[in-house]
Amino acid sequence: MNRYYITTAIDYVNGAPHIGHAYEKILTDVIARHYSQRCDDVYFLTGTDEHGIKIQKTAASQGITPKELCDMNAQKFKDAWKALDIDYTKFIRTTDDYHEVAVQHIFDKLLKQGDIYKHSYEGLYCSGCECFLNPKDLTEDGLCPDHLKKPEVVKEENYFFKLSKYKDAIIKHIKDHPDFILPEFRANEVLNQLEDIQDISVSRAKSNVQWGIDVLGDDEQSIYVWIDALSNYITALGYDENSDDFKKYWPCDVHVIGKDILKFHSIYWPAFLMALDLPLPKHIFAHGWITIDETKMSKSLGNVVSPTSVLENFNMEYPDAFRYYMATSAPCGRDGNYSDDDFKEKVNAHLANSMGNLLNRTLSMLVKYFDGEVKAEFKAENLLAKKALGTVQIVKNHFDNFELAEAGLEIISLVDATNKYVQDNAPWTLAKEEKMVECGQVLTNVLDVMCVIASLIYPYCPNIAKDMARQLSFDLSTKLDDLTADSIKVGKLISKEDIKPVFLRLDSELADKGSKKS
Ligand code: ME8
């Protein structure tokens, strides 16, 4: 496996990033970093979705132009991702010139080949979803079930895409590739939606939606925001088919998206790709949604949490603890929850008490008993090494199914087993009994396993892992398949003044103030 292409959904810029946006970007960054430990070249794409009626209306309500709104908010997304150490390769904005031109060509190609046609239509449009809704999907009160708003009746002559032409091919693809949609339980939902799929409107009248990409040669229509948005996954690579990056990275390994936009990614997008005669992405991973204190986030409830406010409120030097908490907050594809108390409790237990203390105590004993030196006779049979290398395989398997919380649990269970090994072998007692070789062996075995732990925790907690690796003189760029659980070198490893706790317990007084709600 030499190259890996991974994308996130691109976020609407009608507001600032919230914890749900952050959840997805953290999941994607953790996956990208994990695969950077398995292959040479990872391309990680994220960005912002900037056209459509929702942005147009928000800008108007704030008395600014849509472009001003986009520029202001796109920057907030970039700043938040920087604060969270989201290490993307490229940030695409759908208002970037190259993207707009490529989308116009994609639309034009589909029009010329007859996959797009003009048609008069009346439907119910939800600007929150940026799509027409089927009347049977509305609530009893006639509201959009996701946004709880009444959709607008829209009567327009629009361009339509022949989605129905691709229905059978998409059903076949989903059935033939059980890992196309992950987790697998979501595939049935999509197959049900495909049952009554119809052609879809792919443009809006410019008299109603001015903020969009113009249809080439028709200045009365703008291109539907979902064709515009979904195309980002190929325009970012410089699509057309001859671009070097496109040839190198397409098809994508995984689109990481939320469960609410699965239909667009597993029905519309494959159909567009089939029409363009392009291969389909290998996986679509639909994550669940994050609630706050078990309540759905909403502006009206005033419980929208900004990810950077969590970092500020807990006075965190690094985002690692927040990344770890979010990435492990829900089993694969299920909904998760954020609460200040649970956050504090979990990261204090896992990162400070279990993992951080283990390293700190072990290095301190090495300094106390051996002046920080690993002697040749300390390198002996290590019963924990087998478990550590077994954990590496289990973690890899979990990542192949995008089971990040499950992989995290495995890592912590290796930490727990290592703590138990220390407890069972009591190196302090061995030292008291002057069994110094045995004592040195126990400590060295633990430190060897700590190198594996540093490597496995790196995608979640890159700064903590770097601190661990520095104190262990371990090369963190070692690929997962090259890990040996035998990396600690004979000789002086560390001096007292170089031992530093890798994660301090979150200050409870600060934490009790609670995260700012915006
Ligand atoms: O849907 N918990 O943008 P968006 C977890 N522009 N994830 C959440 C969430 C929550 N509470 N709220 C939102 C769009 N998300 C389109 C995407 S892609 C070609 C175009 C996730 O800003 C949501 O599921 O509404 C989606 O994957 C992403 O954040 C962006 O949502």
Image (cartoon, rainbow, N blue to C red):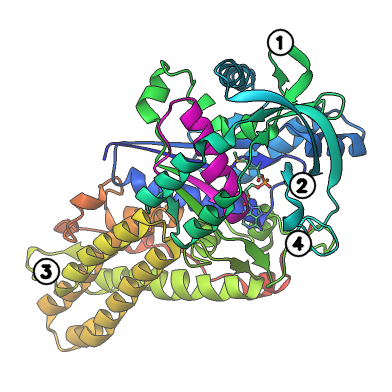
> Which quadrant does the N terminus fall into?
top left
In the image, is 370 to the left or to the right of 178?
left
Q: Nearer the viewer, residue 435 or 250?
A: 250
Q: On the image, numbered disc 4 is attached to which residue?
A: 516
| Magenta-colored stretch includes residue 370 | no
Residue 441 drawn above or below residue 277? below
User: In front: mark 4 or mark 3?
Assistant: 4
First of labels 4, 3 by sequence position:
3
Residue 215 drawn above or below residue 513? above
Please rate how many residues cluster around mark 4, counting C-alpha atoms within 10 Å: few if below 14, some from 14 to 19, many from 20. Answer: some
| Magenta-colored stretch includes residue 265 | yes
Residue contact at pointers 1 and 3, CB within 8 angstroms: no
Residue contact at pointers 4 and 2, CB within 8 angstroms: no
First of labels 4, 2 by sequence position:
2
Q: On the image, numbered disc 3 is attached to which residue?
A: 378
Q: Amino acid at mark 1?
A: Gly
Q: Nearer the viewer, residue 304 or 467?
A: 304
Q: Classify mark 1: helix, strand or loop.
A: loop
Q: Classify mark 4: helix, strand or loop.
A: loop
**Mark 4–mark 1 distance (CA, rounded to whole Å):** 49 Å
The residues colored magenta run 255-283
**Mark 1: C-beta under 8 Å from nearest atom of ligand 1:** no
Please rate how many residues cluster around mark 3, counting C-alpha atoms within 10 Å: few if below 14, some from 14 to 19, many from 20. Answer: some
